[in-house]
Amino acid sequence: MKFFRSKKDHQDTDEPASKEGQGSVYEQENKTENVVDDGGIKETKTRKEGLFSRLSKTRKAFSEGLFGFLERSSSIDDDFFEELEDQLVLADLGADTSEEIVIRLRDDVRKYSLTDSGELVERLKAYLIDMLSFPEPIDFVKKEGSPYVILMVGVNGVGKTTTLAKISKHYQDQGQSVMMAACDTFRAAAIEQLQSWGEKLGVTVVAQSHGADAAAVAFDAYSAACARGMDVLLIDTAGRQHTHGDLMEQLKKIKKVLDKTNAGIPHEVLLTVDAGNGQNIHSQVESFSKMVDVNGLCVTKLDGTAKGGVVISVIRKFGIPVRYLGVGEKVTDLKQFFAAEFIDAMLPDFSSKDD
Ligand SMILES: Nc1nc2c(ncn2[C@@H]2O[C@H](COP(=O)(O)OP(=O)(O)OP(=O)(O)O)[C@@H](O)[C@H]2O)c(=O)[nH]1
Ligand SMILES: [Mg+2]
């Protein structure tokens, strides 16, 4: 029998693999309807409109090498696993995660005498979903007497301000009142950029002048948000290189001032990272976490050609959940992160041709 000549019909599995509990919100929000025939490829309506279609370039970058390799392979031996590991590293999964996955797959092949390429990919998907699964995200917690405060941090140009605007829209769509704080007092025109988003979204922006103390702006904004009984306060901050000590200290000060005002705020410190930065993201997560206890990640620019595997390696290494994915420049181009949906969008069903 030739290896990797699957007779299984993997095309029937358009529904993403999901883990009980983890995928339930995703499944509820993405009930599939209308099957659309798109050039011979059957896609559900959900897939066409959702993350699957937005990640088309990333999916290609992520899975093309891997699938090409599986198609070329004719047997499972040590060389096969070695190259499989290389392919996972090339897909930006990082060396440790790739090694861990290959160890698990090796075990499976031995234990279950696997010879089916489709089954191997399904197992790979299940392991990835397992690695990425966190308890369902708490999307919004109404805090007694305090708005829900989110501090946006990250290096320059990764998409912090745009993501902040997208998150504002996300909460507004749920009927929450939102206020913004312009704590990027460093970059010219940053305040105006946030004010412009505020105008578009009908959100009040608390700002001082260029060069003002960012922590003082955060304090003012928090006081104003409390006084007006706002549900959510989103704080924009200046982009800073994680290696820049003074700027990182400034970020710490913003957090300290907020925490003094009301212990436990900000409720979320969201580090925005650009998927295109690949494994560099690891050092960003490390440095920002040390300074401000990052408890969530936003991964932007996944609509581009980034491989996206870094999402997997970062979660694996730091145990910090990814909360949002940026899939374009528009205010609606934001997706909440669900492991099963993400893996489904990154790894299409694999089926090999019959002889
Ligand atoms: N394609 C794409 N572009 C994005 C995404 N998110 C942000 N951008 C673009 O990235 C550029 C920088 O976005 P900003 O939101 O200003 O980034 P920032 O991190 O606030 O930048 P600084 O404040 O200068 O550090 C803009 O052109 C955005 O439109 C995304 O998910 N996809
Ligand atoms: Mg900005």
Image: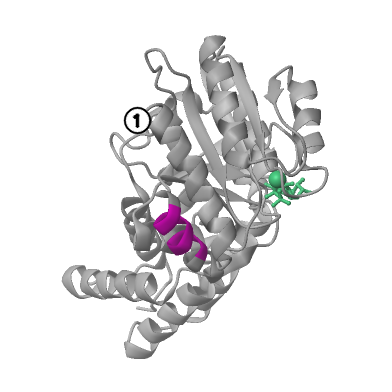
Name the foreground residue: 174 vs 63. 174
Left or right: residue 315 versus residue 30 is left
Kind of residue at badge 1: Ala
Name the foreground residue: 87 vs 211. 211
Left or right: residue 109 versus residue 346 is left
Left or right: residue 103 versus residue 161 is left
Q: Position of residue 234 (x, y in %)?
A: 58, 30
Magenta span covers which residues?
284-291
Q: Is residue 72 above or below residue 49?
A: below
Q: Quadrant of residue 124?
A: bottom left
Q: Is residue 217 above or below residue 173?
A: below
Which residue is tagged 1? Answer: 263
Dot 1 beta carbon under 8 Å from ligand 2? no
Q: Residues within 10 Å of mark 1 (few under 14, many from 20)?
A: few
Specify whether residue 43 is in view.
no
Specify whether residue 124 is in view.
yes
Name the foreground residue: 298 vs 84. 298
Q: Is residue 130 above or below residue 75?
A: above
- Is the N terminus in the top left, top right, bottom left or bottom right quadrant? bottom left
Residue for point 54% across, 11% down: 227
Q: Position of residue 284 (x, y in %)?
A: 52, 63
Residue for point 57% across, 60% down: 246
Q: Quadrant of residue 180?
A: top right
Residue for point 81% across, 35% down: 192
- Asked if the stretch drawn in magenta spans residue 109, the answer is no
Farthest-out residue, left: 111
Residue for point 16% across, 70% down: 111
Q: Main secondary structure of the magenta part?
A: helix
